Image (cartoon, rainbow, N blue to C red):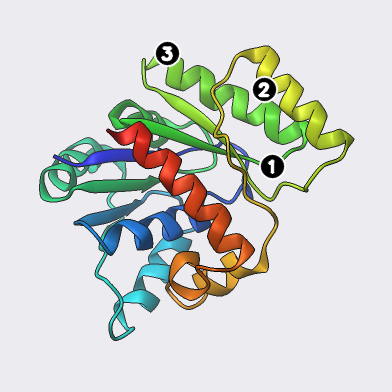
Amino acid sequence: MAFVITIAQQKGGAGKTTIAASLAAVFAARSRVAVLDIDPQHSLARWHTLRAARKGAAPVGFSDVSGWRLAREIDRLRGLNDVLIVDSPPQLDTDARLAIRAADLVLVPLQPSPPDFWAAEGTMKLAAAEKRPARILLNRAPAGGKLRLAVEAAIAEAGYPVFAGTLGNRVGFATAFAQGLGITETAPRSTAGREFGSIVAELERLMR
């Protein structure tokens, strides 16, 4: 049975899809992995098409079933894979609720800004209501600065779990995505690759 990672954040532009793609690429190298794209923009579907056309790229299963068939599709994919990554829509609609309800872990990307934090609060509260573990991942984060410190303080005050590692605003993620690949495939020794590797190591400890 697959470990289900739902990437959720009701604010658009948080980096959900890019993170989903790079995670899928990591797990594809070592296990059976599928992605489920229920974001109406379907950017992950485009990424998957690019990947499927690349010779030598480790295979990643794909589905974009949503709506009334979603719960059954999650169950089907869970039975066929070791890891299932769900890219959820940027609003807390029925599909997002079902994806969070099915998750073994809800990963919440958060750019360090007040609007992103306020949006993440809704996602964290929904995960708590569904009794699903959730963890914030600071994404596109500057190395320091007052804004980042303020958001980190707000996360701590709210008591939300957060990844120890962070992801900077690295062009390498977009470059890898445009090729149907993940950052650990295109530039594993880059700063972006090392940052993402740290997140994956932490994630794998949570999956045990």
- Work out whether residue 85 or residue 94 is closer to the camera in this orientation and state it: 85
Q: Which mark is residue 155?
A: 2
- Work out whether residue 141 or residue 127 is closer to the camera in this orientation and state it: 141
- Work out whether residue 69 or residue 152 is closer to the camera in this orientation and state it: 152
The image position of residue 40, as x and y in percent, is 46, 52
Q: Mark 1 points at which residue?
A: 111
Instruction: State the quadrant of the C terminus.
Output: top left
Give the residue at x 49% y 46%.
Answer: 199
Q: Name the residue under label 3.
A: 129
SS label for mark 1: loop
Residue type of the residue flagged with mark 2: Ile
Residue 83 appears in the figure? yes
How packed is label 3: few (under 14 Cα within 10 Å), some, or many (20 or more)? few
Instruction: State the quadrant of the N terminus.
Output: top left
Residue 99 appears in the figure? no
Horizontal relation, residue 126 to residue 80: left or right: right
Above/below status of 178 relative to 34: below
The image position of residue 111, as x and y in percent, is 69, 42
